[in-house]
Amino acid sequence: MGIKLGILGLGTVGTGTVELLSDGTGRHPLLSEIEIYRVGVRSLDKPRQVTLPDSVITTDLESIVTDPQVDIVVELMGGLEPARSLILKAIQCGKHVVTANKAVISRFGDEIFTAANQAGVYVMLEAAVGGGIPVVRPLKQSLSVNRINTVTGIVNGTTNYILTRMRSEGGNFDDVLADAQRLGYAEADPTADVDGLDAADKIAILASLAFDGRIKLEDVYCEGIRQVSKTDIAYADKLGFVIKLLAIAHQDNLSAPLSVRVHPTLVPTDHPLASINGVYNAILVEGEPIGQVMFFGPGAGAGATASAVCSDILNLVAELKLSTENANPLLTCRHHDYSQIAPIEELVTRFYARFLTKDQPGVIGKLGTCFGKYGVSLESVVQTGFQGELAEIVVVTHDVREGDFRQALAEIRSLDPIHSIPSLLRVL
Ligand code: NAP
Ligand code: HSE
């Protein structure tokens, strides 16, 4: 029997989720047990990127969350109401919930999780922070034996994009924001992003998971990036910093109160978060005994966010199947056949090679001719100096099939002026 989903919302993330669930080839086999049973939208007349039977789509979202056939409600509509009420109604009706809605969770998490615990259902929220980046489950499970002392995140792609462009182009905030809106990176109303409110929602959720306590959103200190000028960015650069909108949750020691805050911050250029540019997100978690661990990836977008939503759905499907099967399909080893591995000769890559040769005319020409014979094209050739009597020549190739490159080298080794090839490295 399939697991029936009731999806609320068919916008960016809803569409990405339906597309991913409808294209199971090469993905986890549990996906084939999921049925997109009902989908709720605001308007039936809007053109959609995905085709679903008319009987599946409805504007009556309440009828989805109360439908006894629906096993899991997937809330991808956003906003506070009616999202909050529909999530609570789904829980009341005994359904597990998956949501990407950080605004609802950061404000009403207390009410929602209390209701879910009472009803014996799960509310899953991997997509609510960091889009496609797995960070919620790592904090809840993989890292939970650590004493976490700091979570530092670049968790808002819009502001990171604006600050990155202000730095690379020397542009001012208003111009870069206008351009980001034109390109679709920033929303028409950018308030939630540029004033740090979206990042505050996300760090409230991360802090709650990392430090095992509920967080009141009003306790999160929040400053946005409107006051960051190109002059500040230029000075920061000169001093060895980049300016990033950081969301930070920190605890000095186990009995100290938490500090949870969002503000533009000068980050040393050698800090792991300094090189996170554009719309990307990253979350650095520090704890004992793990030390530092960083999660990096796309913080938004249809496909990336759908990846997080569907991983939550898969975990709930596995949970539901446990009642009828005696092994968790996500924990057991599910494959039996050996994978086909390509031989190294078939690898296509660039190579760096260093040759020691006799110092005589025509050596570089001979190298080039021999490489050419085997279809190896050279990106650069430099004679770097001498080692004793021998000349040192360094070659970087274009992409080449490793087998062809090795054939060329075998012939080159036999050439009279070639003394040795002390280094051979692949280039990314
Ligand atoms: P979206 O494109 O605006 O889509 C919202 C969908 O919900 C639309 O299909 C809309 O119906 C439906 N909807 C909204 N209010 C409704 C109502 N009152 N009744 C019925 N249907 C309603 O939003 P999105 O970007 O997919 O975001 C969805 C959620 O994911 C939000 O919580 C957001 O914060 C979160 N999220 C988004 C991203 C991202 O990259 N976009 C990343 C991470 C998390 P119509 O289509 O008929 O208008
Ligand atoms: N508006 C968010 C951002 C994406 O710019 O990162 C959804 O969380």
Image: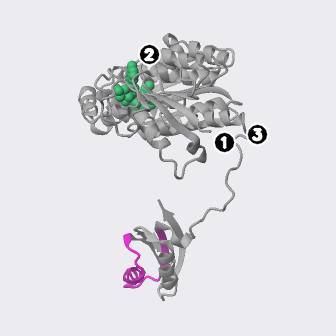
> What amino acid is labelled 2 in the image?
Pro
Q: Position of residue 57 (x, y in %)?
A: 41, 30
The answer for how far apart the CA atoms under marks 3 and 2 are is 38 Å
* Pick the front one: 398 or 183: 183
Q: Which numbered disc covers residue 82? A: 2
In the rendered image, residue 373 lying in the magenta stretch gets the answer: yes
Q: Position of residue 56 (x, y in %)?
A: 44, 32
Q: Quickly name the residue at label 3.
A: 326
The answer for how far apart the CA atoms under marks 3 and 1 are is 12 Å
The residue that appears at 47% across and 86% down in the rendered structure is: 417
**Residues drawn in magenta:** 352-380
Question: Is the CB of mark 2 within 8 Å of ligand 1?
Answer: yes
> What amino acid is labelled 3 in the image?
Asn
User: Which residue extends farthest right?
Assistant: 326
Task: Identify the element where label 1 is drawn.
Answer: loop
Q: Which numbered disc covers residue 330? A: 1
The residue that appears at 68% across and 50% down in the rendered structure is: 334
**358 relative to 165 in the view: left or right:** right
The residue that appears at 44% across and 16% down in the rendered structure is: 82
Look at the numbered discs 3 and 2 and tell me whether their residues touch, using CB distance below 8 Å. Answer: no
Where on the picture, by quarter, is residue 89?
A: top right
- Asked if one can make out residue 93 in the rendered structure from this viewpoint, the answer is yes
- Asked if one can make out residue 200 in the rendered structure from this viewpoint, the answer is no
Figure quarter occupied by ligand 1: top left
Q: Position of residue 254 (x, y in %)?
A: 69, 18
Disc with the residue nearer the chain's start (2 vs 1): 2
